[in-house]
Amino acid sequence: MRDYLAVRGLAVVLLLCAKLMVDTARMEETDWRLVIVTLAYVWVFAGMWLTISPWRLRDLIHWATASEQRTRLLSGLRLGFALLVVALGLTVFK
């Protein structure tokens, strides 16, 4: 059980950050807040999933880094979404 303590800690951080994001999104009256709320609910699902079965994070990391092409594709997708969130933060959420 000691090996999975970091994964369970990550799950708790995901759940706490998701609550903060949903509470913050309630303050805005724009439709773009659904992007942030959707990300928060994905984090809630991931947090619960990692709490129930923490060994799956190891399997997910192994799958995501199995080939260089897959690693580049997933990193590009995460970078694109991060740029979208930054752009929303600078323009819509003030």
Image: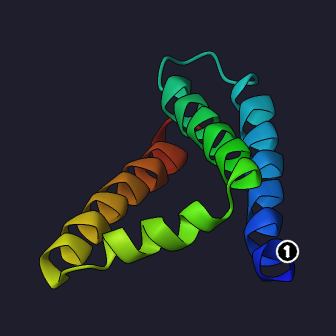
Left or right side of 61 for 21: right
Q: Answer whether residue 18 is visible to the viewer in this image.
A: yes
Residue 7: image location, x then y, percent: 73, 69
Q: Quadrant of the N terminus?
A: bottom right
What colouring method underlies this structural image?
A: rainbow
- Quarter of the rendering containing residue 53: bottom right
Structural crowding at the residue carrying mark 1, measured as other residues with C-alpha within 10 Å and reported as few (<14), some (14–19) or many (≥20): few
* Tag 1 residue: 1
Q: Amino acid at mark 1?
A: Met
Q: Is residue 20 left or right of residue 43?
A: right
Q: Position of residue 80 (x, y in %)?
A: 30, 57
Q: As displayed, is residue 20 above or below residue 33?
A: below
Quarter where residue 26 is shown: top right
Question: For the image shown, how many numbered marks are present on the structure?
Answer: 1
Q: Give the residue drawn at x 61%, y 47%.
A: 46
Along the line of sight, which residue is nearer the eye, 63 or 45? 63
Determine whether the residue tagged by mark 1 lies in a helix, strand or loop: loop
Residue 44 coordinates in the image, percent (x, y): 69, 39
Q: Nearer the viewer, residue 51 or 88?
A: 51
Question: Who is closer to the viewer here, 82 or 58?
Answer: 58
Q: x%, y% of residue 56?
A: 56, 61
